[in-house]
Amino acid sequence: MSQQNSRYDIHDLSEKFMKGTLTDAERVWFEQWYASFDDSLLELTGSRHASRKALHAAMKKRIQAAIASRARKPRQRMLFIWSAAAALILICSFAALYTFRRQAPETQLTAIVPGKDKAVLTLADGKKILLDEAADGSLAVEHGVHITKTGSGMVSYDFKQAGGSNSPEVYNTIRTPRGGQFRLTLSDGTRIWLNSDSYVRFPVNFGPNERRIEAGGELYLEVAKDPRHKFLVRTDRQTVEVLGTRFNINAYTDESEIRTTLFEGSVKLSSIRSSLILKPGQQSVLSAEQKITIDENADPEVAAAWKNGYFMFDREDIRSAMRKIGRWYDVDVVYQGEVPDDWLGGSISRYKRVEDVLAKLQLTGQIHFKIEGRRVIVMH
């Protein structure tokens, strides 16, 4: 519902709503506007709190303080007041979005759209297949293994027709560009999700001793259980050893740390200087000094958010958040002036317009953005 196309002014109605003086017609319009608004924009704020729970508790405390500063209401009207507090947050979000869009430069010639299912498959002989352009169905046959595009964003290596254990190991690679993502099922049944600017190199059919792949960027894996053949994932600084499990690896080269988050099962992490056993619900951090530690405050839900279609920030600095946004929307990020070191917390769909995502970040009051072509300029 557009405020511009209405005879009502949303700010006037919000004040009447708080005072309880809305007419019946105004109340109907206001409730329709409230219901139509995207409530996913309510969660982000600047914070130094230790966790999402602490952040949400602080937000609730601020709302309670704002309510307490107004004239006291009877106890039976508390539900009404809480709704009004939520409405005020919506209004602030609406105003920030409206202001940001009005300030968007007219020089923006190329639309910045969210990422999509897009990747390149490189076969053993070097042939490249653009997976987003390829039709569904058979793509190739490598040493008896049928490679099929089974649907949007999915490639499958048919393990039922895979060759025997004596078949030579030949490797394929799937690489997603910035602004891309893809899914893959290996010949043993292991499923892999690739985030933007990521790759995985793997044998079309695993050998008799172990299952080994190489990866970079960010991947979520559901490893097929096979007690006789351990599964190894090697990045540039770390090796993950599993039998059957679900986990996420964030190993971008432009990040100072490699983070591995375990959802199910058990994994052993190894680097040049240290090793560690990870338990479900834990997240490991491999530092630039090759030391592996556990982040006790990490929220596993945050690690898998990208796979589920969300940006989710938890105790995350602005530069880290903007690297995620830059990869997904395939934009360059430029900074002007000092960048605040506040932490961010909250979530928003990855399929929103980039203007909406940036407008939400602006609600922290710490940063502002300007879009020029495919550049996002971050200003304090």
Image (cartoon, helix red, strand yellow):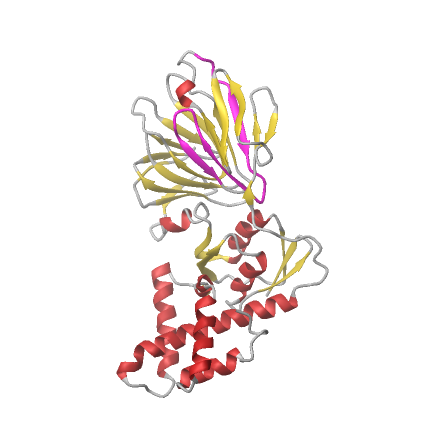
Q: Nearer the viewer, residue 86 or 9?
A: 9
Q: Nearer the viewer, residue 292 or 378?
A: 378
Q: Position of residue 46 (x, y in %)?
A: 47, 65
Tell me if residue 331 comes above or below residue 160 in the rendering.
below
Tell me if residue 238 comes above or below residue 378 in the rendering.
above
Q: Position of residue 180 (x, y in %)?
A: 56, 42
Does the magenta-highlighted stretch encompass residue 273?
no
Residue at position x 43%, y 47% in the image: 308
Q: How many marks?
A: 0
- Residue most toward the top? 166
Residue at position x 50%, y 61% in the image: 341
Tell me where residue 276 sits by quadrant. top left
Does the magenta-highlighted stretch encompass residue 179?
yes
Q: Nearer the viewer, residue 23 or 192?
A: 23
Tell me if residue 5 comes above or below residue 258 in the rendering.
below
Residue at position x 69%, y 63% in the image: 105
Quadrant containing the C terminus is bottom right
Tell me if residue 340 comes above or below residue 198 in the rendering.
below
Tell me where residue 78 sits by quadrant. bottom left
User: What segment carries the magenta color?
Assistant: 167-194
- Residue most toward the left? 75
Q: Position of residue 16 (x, y in %)?
A: 45, 84
User: Does any portion of residue 211 appear in the rendered image?
Assistant: yes
User: Does any portion of residue 236 appear in the rendered image?
Assistant: no
| In the image: residue 310, left or right of residue 67 | right
Residue at position x 45%, y 71% in the image: 32
Tell me where residue 339 sits by quadrant. bottom right
